[in-house]
Image: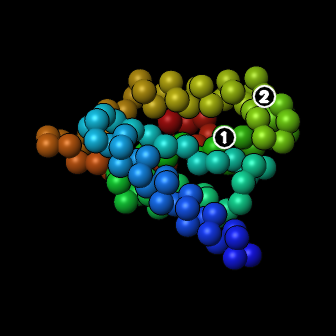
């Protein structure tokens, strides 16, 4: 259990550093959660809390990959799942500017399922 706690802390620190590096480019940024079959819930919390802290939008993969047909194997989406994810990403890029006003006011939006 202690080893998992250390891994979780290391993941959290590394993930926060990656997000800080991305944000330094001052470009609209959206993060994805990890879908359930792959990793422990603790990492989901790190992704969500870091995104919210930084006003980033979130693609909630657990709401997109909802059936066995969405997976090619336990850790990879199938062509069906990939098409669903591509549909959500396309809709996000086409329909959201991620900026409330100038100067940039970041806000967190959670995207899942097919409606964006």
For image coordinates 49% across by 27% down, the residue present is 91
Query: Up-down: is 56 above or below 97?
Result: below
The residue tagged with tag 2: helix, strand or loop? Answer: loop
The residue tagged with tag 1: helix, strand or loop? Answer: helix
Question: Reading the chain from its start, which is encountered first: label 1 or label 2?
Answer: 1
In whole angstroms, how far apart are the C-alphas of marks 1 and 2? 12 Å
Please state, as top left, top right, bottom left or bottom right, where the N terminus lies in the image.
Answer: bottom right
Residue 2: x, y in percent? 69, 76
Residue 17: x, y in percent? 41, 52
Residue 69: x, y in percent? 84, 33
Identify which residue, 75 or 109, lies in the foreground.
75
For image coordinates 85% across by 36% down, the residue present is 73
Query: Up-down: is 52 above or below 116?
Result: below
For image coordinates 76% across by 35% down, the residue present is 76
Disc 2 crowd rating (10 Å Cα; few below 14, some 14-19, many 20+) is some
**In this figure, which residue is indicated by the disc labeled 2?**
78
Q: Is residue 45 visible?
A: no
For image coordinates 41% across by 47% down, the residue present is 19
Name the disc covering residue 64, or none: 1
């Amino acid at each position: 259990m202690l080893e998992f706690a250390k891994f979780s802390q290391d993941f959290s620190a590394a993930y926060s550093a990656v997000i800080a590096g991305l944000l330094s480019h001052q470009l609209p940024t959206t993060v994805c959660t990890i879908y359930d079959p792959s990793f422990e819930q603790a990492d989901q919390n790190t992704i969500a809390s870091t995104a919210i802290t930084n006003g980033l939008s979130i693609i909630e993969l657990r709401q997109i990959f909802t059936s066995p047909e969405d997976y090619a194997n336990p850790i990879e989406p199938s062509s069906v799942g990939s098409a669903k994810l591509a549909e959500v990403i396309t809709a996000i890029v086409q329909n959201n500017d991620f900026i409330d006003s100038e100067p940039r006011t970041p806000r967190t939006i959670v995207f899942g399922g097919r409606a964006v």
